[in-house]
Image (tube, grey):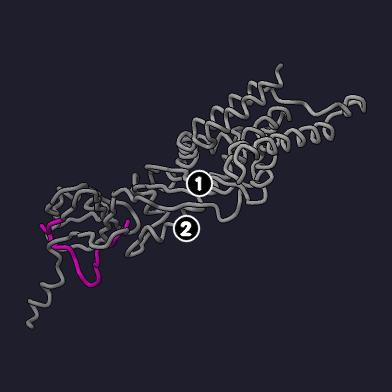
Amino acid sequence: MGLFDFVAKQFIDVIQWTEDEPGVLAWRYPMADMEIQNGAQLVVRETQQAVFIDEGRFADRFDAGTYTLTTQTLPVLTYLKNWDKFFESPFKSDVYYFSLREQIDRKWGTTQPITVRDKEFGPLRIRAFGTYSFRIAELEPFWRKLSGTAARYTVDDLDGQLRAIILTALGSFLGGSAVAFVDMAANQAEFSNRLKEAVAPAFREYGLELATFFLQSLSLPEELEKHLDRAASQRIVGDLGQYTRFQTADAIPLAAENPGGIAGIGAGMGAGLAMAQAMGQAMTATPPAAATAGPAQEDPIALIEKLGDLLAKGLITQAEFEAKKTELLGRIQ
């Protein structure tokens, strides 16, 4: 190889980035032992920006397109270098490409529960998980604070930093939020938007735009969920009389499925009424005289209506229905 061929190989005539590897946010064109030739072509594809950086300073930046590098296309860099040869000789500078694509389906989640003061239940430890997407919006803060002089900077390099940003903003928001946990869980779409508004400013400080932010799961520690389930059950029970009627109605189809058919209904009703009496005596301040009163009997007409439902569903026969209906009607007389 002749000397001329060797020297010629040190001049760069085409600068481009094909983005053949997904997830790369910033890429430095390899310039080792090479210089950019006057009149070289700079190719910037859609969803890219290219930046010439000279001695740690942002010089010129280029959006999508193909450019011929001259003093007209590199005015800032020309000014910085104070070239007095009108760009006739080769020059050397760092060229960085940045991907402006939206980086989708990034995961976030709480490594430890976040303690919040719920307006209904008091202090709670909440776990939250979801997804988000982002893109580079401002090149200079992104380069200065994150990618720096790295030859290659990826979403995986940034992942830990973004998770920390999200969890810090999330903790501050939830800690001062007046929204009850049940309201958060009931309307995750609206709450996702509110969380996005809380997290987005921290992203902007690094030159990033938080494109989407989704809350997919909001949960409490298992033992606390069990406690809330018990408390909810107690509130649902509320009126013992209403609870007993529900239990009795629920027992009728089960008894009808057992051997003996309709004969099991009476046993189910008796058990429900007995349970109601026992619970009522235990949980209400009933005087002794009232406590010795006989067990309350459910309205025969209401029982006939329930039997009619069982007949319509095919759980009892017409003969069983007629027999039990006659018995119940006899109580009215």
Q: Magenta stretch mostly in which secondary structure? A: strand
Residue at the outermost bottom position: 1
- Please tell me which residue is depicted at 67% across the width and 24% down the height of the picture: 328
> The residue tagged with tag 1: helix, strand or loop?
strand
Q: Is residue 251 left or right of residue 196?
A: right
Evaluate if marks 2 and 1 touch, with contact meaning CB atoms under 8 Å apart.
Answer: no
Q: How many marks?
A: 2
How would you rate the neighbour count of disc 1 (Cα within 10 Å): few for under 14, some for 14-19, many for 20 or more? Answer: few
Q: Between 49 and 54, which is closer to the camera in this rendering?
A: 49
x then y, percent, for residue 202:
47, 44
Q: Nearer the viewer, residue 319 or 39?
A: 319
> Magenta residues?
24-42
To which residue does mark 2 refer? 160
The dot on residue 314 is none
| Label annotation for residue 217 | 1
Looking at numbered disc 2 in the image, what kind of residue is underneath it? Gly
Amino acid type of the residue that numbered disc 1 sits on in the rendered structure: Ser
> Within the image, what quadrant is residue 272 found in?
top right
Task: Name the residue: 21% across, 47% down.
Answer: 63
